[in-house]
């Protein structure tokens, strides 16, 4: 504007002087052309320059915050600071800020003072890329929310490379946390909590990444090729532009989506007892032991609803149906520590370290220490559990939760969080499976699940079906279970479960006969393979229900 522009109203200072000397870095303004409002801006420097275009004109550097939503001529209330007052540069008095919001900010830019404060906060924020040697200090094992210091000097007392970056970092700055060789992955998001004190800089961990981002993915991302870390990789703290930070954040969010406060259905103890056919007393013991021991195994014959019960037990403790806080795996003979925790996996150029599903879930749980998380393992005794769990045998114990030990694979610290619970399921009728060894057995509490034909929940279900044939068949199956219980070669672990008869949409003779012929009789053939006459007798008894 012209530096000789006169004063207006009751102010003695010329508008030219106000533009040059009163407006400061960080001040907001709106720009007009005539009576039309064009944009909302912010002064970004205290520097004032003489115009190279017009004599006696001066210029100020600024950035555009938002374009106007309505560029038609302003026709509202007239103030010294409104477009229709024929002024060039005049401040809005504090006592009229509310009017400024109502007449200018909201109708033309759809923002208020709180929005401008957020813009101010973002404009002051800087972005950094911190590279650390995980064998000296591991960001992945650092608890979320914990403050950590980082020295400005190396072991020899010399300044870290790009030392100015440590001096420039301010409170609130965002940091991408990267672990160097052998990990070579982005593993965390951090935030500066205290500025450097000439010895150290301080920050806290904001988020653990359950799915870390590989160096190769960063390197291949368009727009990151000029990142300071790639141009000058010798150092620890590197600058990131806002665009670079947001691109890395996009990569992170593809693999680590933010948990939204989505609407979830509530789930109570009463819901559990309606869904799972166990007694009230047994449920209370389930929940009490799981909360105390952290690790339980639900064992029993096929068809007693172990898998069904495990997930709903987790729901009832969370008090909501939230599958984001549940992970489900099934063990098998080829399942390994590398699948479960971490290990080297083939890649294009050979092998690279990859984190397993349990490691990732532990990182996810550590981000929300105030919420319960559940890791459910189906067929837990089908895998070689000592081989799969490795050093986790100690870490999963309740007394050792949050305690760190070095992992054998990479020598890095790792811990299992307090809020993570493990629920395993074990089929007691499969003779081909080995028993769980005592070292592992000591880490779990074992609950035996039995057929629930006599529970209140199943009786209500049975009454609802209102089928005499169904009632008669259930009585026969209960008699069959009595004989299985008395058989010295079988016992309670081989009884017929209630779940074979659950979730029937229509209770027809055809549906019930299918259950008998294709579920129950094949199992009896397996049980009494050397007593065909007994199998034949029970076949006739069960078929007799339909005559």
Image: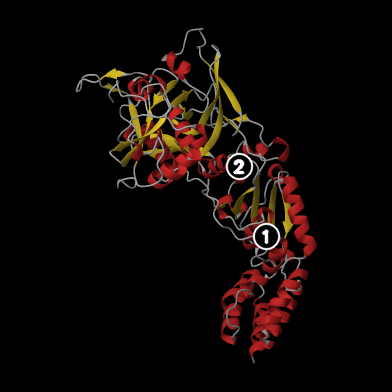
Q: Residue at x 44, y 13 (%)?
A: 163
| Name of the residue lying farthest toward the right | 281
Considering only order in the chain, which callout, 1 or 2, is on the residue closer to the N terminus? 2
Q: With 177 as the anchor, is 413 left or right in this view? A: right
Q: Which mark is residue 540?
A: none
* Quarter where residue 313 is shown: bottom right
* Quarter where residue 311 is shown: bottom right
For marks 2 and 1, give the one nearer the viewer: 2
Q: Which mark is residue 368?
A: 2
Residue under label 1: 428
Q: Secondary structure at mark 1?
A: loop
Residue at mark 2 to residue at mark 1: CA–CA distance: 35 Å
Work out whether residue 274 or residue 12 is closer to the camera in this orientation and state it.
Answer: 12
Q: With 297 as the anchor, is 244 left or right in this view? A: left
Q: Can you say which quadrant of the picture contains the N terminus?
A: top left
Crowding near the residue tagged with mark 1, few <14, some 14–19, many ≥20 C-alpha atoms within 10 Å: some
Asked if residue 181 shows in the view, the reply is no
Residue 519 drawn above or below residue 289: below
Q: Residue at x 71, y 74 (%)?
A: 458
Q: Position of residue 379 (x, y in %)?
A: 60, 55
């Amino acid at each position: 504007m012209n530096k000789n522009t006169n004063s207006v109203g009751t102010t003695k200072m010329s508008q030219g002087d106000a533009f040059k000397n009163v407006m400061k870095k960080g001040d907001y303004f709106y720009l007009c052309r005539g009576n039309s409002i064009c944009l909302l801006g912010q002064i970004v420097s205290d520097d004032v320059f003489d115009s190279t275009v017009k004599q006696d004109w001066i210029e100020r550097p600024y950035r555009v915050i938002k374009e106007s939503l309505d560029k038609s001529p302003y026709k509202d209330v007239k103030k010294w600071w409104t477009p229709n007052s024929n002024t060039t540069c005049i401040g809005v008095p504090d006592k009229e800020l509310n009017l400024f919001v109502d007449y200018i900010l909201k109708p033309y830019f759809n923002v208020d003072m709180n929005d401008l404060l957020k813009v101010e906060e973002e404009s002051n924020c800087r972005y950094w890329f911190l590279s650390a040697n995980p064998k000296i200090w591991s960001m992945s094992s650092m608890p979320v929310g914990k403050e950590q210091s980082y020295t400005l000097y190396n072991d020899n007392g010399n300044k870290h490379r790009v030392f100015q970056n440590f001096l420039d970092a301010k409170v609130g700055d965002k940091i991408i946390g990267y672990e160097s060789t052998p990990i070579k992955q982005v593993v965390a998001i951090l935030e500066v909590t205290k500025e450097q004190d000439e010895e150290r800089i301080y920050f806290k961990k904001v988020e653990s990444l359950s799915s870390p981002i590989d160096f190769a993915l960063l390197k291949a991302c368009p727009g990151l090729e000029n990142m300071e870390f790639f141009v000058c990789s010798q150092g620890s703290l590197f600058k990131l532009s806002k665009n670079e930070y947001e691109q890395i954040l996009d990569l992170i969010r593809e693999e680590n989506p933010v948990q939204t406060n989505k609407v979830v259905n509530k789930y109570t103890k009463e819901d559990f007892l309606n869904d799972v056919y166990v007694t009230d007393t047994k449920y209370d013991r389930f929940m009490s032991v799981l909360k105390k021991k952290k690790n339980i195994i639900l064992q029993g014959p096929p068809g007693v609803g172990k898998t069904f019960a495990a997930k709903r037990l987790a729901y009832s403790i969370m008090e909501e149906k939230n599958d984001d806080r549940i992970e489900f795996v099934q063990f098998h003979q080829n399942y390994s520590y590398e699948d479960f925790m971490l290990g080297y996996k083939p890649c294009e150029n050979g092998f690279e370290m990859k984190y397993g599903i349990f490691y990732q879930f532990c990182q996810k749980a550590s981000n929300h220490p105030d919420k319960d998380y559940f890791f459910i393992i189906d067929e837990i005794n089908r895998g070689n559990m000592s081989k799969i769990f490795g050093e986790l045998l100690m870490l999963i114990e309740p007394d050792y939760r949050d305690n760190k030990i070095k992992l054998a694979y990479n020598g890095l610290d790792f811990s299992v969080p307090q809020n993570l619970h493990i629920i395993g399921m074990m089929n007691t009728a499969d003779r081909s499976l080995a028993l769980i060894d005592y070292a592992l057995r000591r880490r779990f509490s074992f609950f035996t699940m039995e057929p629930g034909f006599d529970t209140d929940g199943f009786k209500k279900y049975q009454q609802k079906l209102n089928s005499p044939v169904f009632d008669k068949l259930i009585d026969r199956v209960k008699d069959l279970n009595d004989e299985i219980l008395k058989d010295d070669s079988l016992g309670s672990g081989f009884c017929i479960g209630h779940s074979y008869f659950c979730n029937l949409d229509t209770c027809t003779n055809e549906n019930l006969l299918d259950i008998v012929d294709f579920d129950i009789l094949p199992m009896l053939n397996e049980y009494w393979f050397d007593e065909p006459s007994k199998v034949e007798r029970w076949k006739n008894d069960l078929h007799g229900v339909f005559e």
